[in-house]
Amino acid sequence: MNSMYFNEEHQMFRKSLKDFLQKEVVPHIEKWEETGTIESFIWKKFGDMGYFGLAYPESYGGLDLDIFYTVILLEELQKINSGGFAAAIWAHAYLAMTHLNKEGDDRIKKEYLAPSISGEKVGCLCVTEPFGGSDVAGMRSTAVKQGDYYILNGSKTFITNGVYCDYMVVAAKTNPELGNKGISMFVVDKDTPGVSVSKLNKLGWRASDTAEIAYDNVKVPVENLMGEPGKGFPYIMQHFALERLLMGINAHARSEFALDYVLTYMNERKTFGKRLDEYQALRHKYADLYANMEMCREYNYSVAHRLNKGEYVVKEATISKLQSTKMADEVAYHCLQFLGGYGYMEDYPMARLFRDSRLGPIGGGTSEILREIIAKMVIDKKSYKPAT
């Protein structure tokens, strides 16, 4: 592993994490993939190991470590070949919890962030809507202030952890007439009256729960507003940089797993008296795939390094997700092809990886939206600034 970014402590962490995943997670993956339900005990085990607190303050039970511990967590989660389980973990730890940490006050951090770090509570981030998709500014959910409460109405969809969560970080318009300048962020307990959840049936990420959520006159206490009212859009955009980099890292990691697996297969599989890795057409295709994976991985590490220094890497993180998820889909396609008929069988890892990989260019902003963001920045010279 690249020593420019990973020191000895990082490597020791990676080894202990690998051991933990093999012992505590891998034996249950097939069951969770089959049932679509991750058993609750694993959240507490992750919390006890400190894995949810890697990036968070020690004052709330976190470890306050550099971003490359998070990179390692993401990479090793991909290498157990359950995109759904990985998504459930990182959506909790880096989508919902990021907002709690950045916008929540001390009370919210004590009541929601601390138990999220310990694994006692599970959260989800609710931004995407049935009619909006990647159009965050076009959301229709509203939160109207009435006395000591905001009255929340609307719906969200494609919400990872939405079915089995304990709380939701919800974006809604408190001043609809102001467009994207009228969006605010709230933390909402899932068991609040008026919240209803439906589980969605997905192509991939089968182990994770993905929900459509409706809010019908939900009373949210005023103190559950996070950050400043009307600042929700810049908060979301700021944290999208992290989410998109996470998805870029996920993409290069699952591609590395696929390439490692298929290389072992090609070394063992023989046709017409030759190993598959001796055929020039296959060797050269593999070399191309590996080179693209390696370029994405090195780029993603460099962006992570800049983010770790506090730089605002919206453009770079957007490029990371766009290019890495495109690369990962190509790797998944060709690695399945390398296995021939076995690649199409559920008994081999490529079928699941192929399905799971396909969400990469969709979730967290579609590739089409990402291209437009990049075009605005490099052609129109539009600048994005962090929320103040």
Image (cartoon, rainbow, N blue to C red):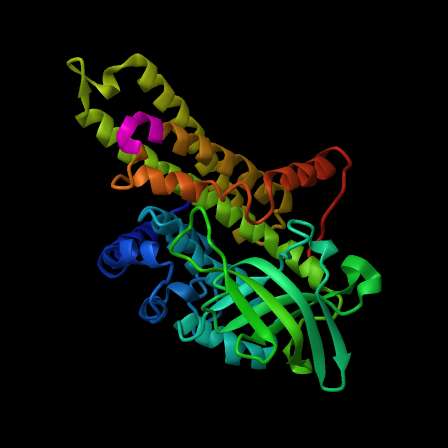
Q: Residue furthest right?
A: 177
Determine if residue 17 is in view: no
Front residue of this view, candidates 180 and 115? 180
* Magenta-drawn stretch contains 169: no
Q: Is residue 281 above or below residue 38?
A: above
Secondary structure of the magenta portion, mostly? helix
Q: Is residue 158 above or below residue 227?
A: above
Name the residue located 39 percent from the left edge and 38 percent from the top edge.
354
Name the residue located 50 percent from the left edge and 38 percent from the top edge.
325
Q: Quadrant of the N terminus?
A: top left
Residue 69: x and y in percent read: 40, 55
Residue 39: image quadrant is bottom left
Residue 49: x and y in percent read: 32, 67
Name the residue located 45 percent from the left edge and 34 percent from the top edge.
329
Q: Residue furthest bottom?
A: 148
Q: With 118 as the anchor, is 375 left or right in this view?
A: right
Q: Residue furthest left?
A: 273
Magenta highlight range: 336-343
Determine if residue 191 is in view: yes
Front residue of this view, candidates 383 and 374? 374
Q: Quadrant of the C terminus?
A: bottom right
Residue 104: x and y in percent read: 60, 73
